[in-house]
Amino acid sequence: MRGANDVITLWNKTREGKNDVWYRHIIRNCSWEQKTIRAVSGQTASIASTIGVLISENPLYKPAKAWAAGDKAAFFTLQNGDLIARGEHGIEITGVTPNTESAIKAGLMPVAFTVRIVQDNTATYKRGRHYYVEGV
């Protein structure tokens, strides 16, 4: 995909028993975009920032259900609640302070976000097949 020269770290979140378990993946060939959204409602103005990432089609990607049933360390998925940061990070989320999701996200701000939107655009685009994620 053209212009896809960013690297991201993705932490996939899954539930095992009563605990959240995180799997870290380094993904190359991405395109990072930060947007500022302005809205006016009556006399109130608000500004919010969202981050979108295009990820080139990747043979290691699995849809969420297939990923959950397979080798979570070898493959990745994209789902709401995952954490993404720009760049390559060796930090593991363990759920124990100081390696909690919130602490790691706060430490990596402003280049980290929680995934809120996921689109698989690999079947609809003949060229530039990609996955798109967005979050705050």
Image (spheres, rainbow, N blue to C red):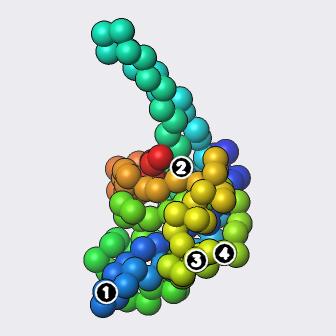
Q: Are marks 1 and 3 in contact (CB under 8 Å)?
A: no
Residue denoted by label 1: 18
Q: Nearer the viewer, mark 1 or mark 3?
A: 3
Mark closer to the chain start, 1 or 4: 1
Q: Amino acid at mark 3?
A: Thr
What's the residue at 57%, 60% (across, down)?
105
Q: Nearer the viewer, mark 2 or mark 1?
A: 1
Q: Nearer the viewer, mark 4 or mark 3?
A: 3
Q: Residues within 10 Å of mark 2 (few under 14, many from 20)?
A: many
Q: Is residue 10 above or below residue 122?
A: below
x then y, percent, for residue 102: 52, 63
Residue denoted by label 4: 91
Mark closer to the chain start, 1 or 3: 1
What's the residue at 52%, 86% (across, down)?
74
Q: Residues within 10 Å of mark 3 (few under 14, many from 20)?
A: few
Q: Nearer the viewer, residue 102 or 34?
A: 102
Residue denoted by label 2: 53
- SS assignment at label 1: loop
What is the quadrant of residue 122 in the picture? bottom left
Q: Nearer the viewer, mark 2 or mark 3?
A: 3
Q: Amino acid at mark 1?
A: Lys
What's the residue at 62%, 74% (across, down)?
98
Q: CA distance from mark 2 to mark 4?
A: 20 Å
What is the quadrant of residue 46 in the picture? top left
Q: Nearer the viewer, mark 1 or mark 4?
A: 1
Q: Are marks 4 and 3 in contact (CB under 8 Å)?
A: no
Q: Amino acid at mark 2?
A: Val
Q: CA distance from mark 4 to mark 3?
A: 13 Å
Residue denoted by label 3: 97
Q: CA distance from mark 1 to mark 4?
A: 22 Å
Mark closer to the chain start, 2 or 3: 2
Mark closer to the chain start, 2 or 4: 2
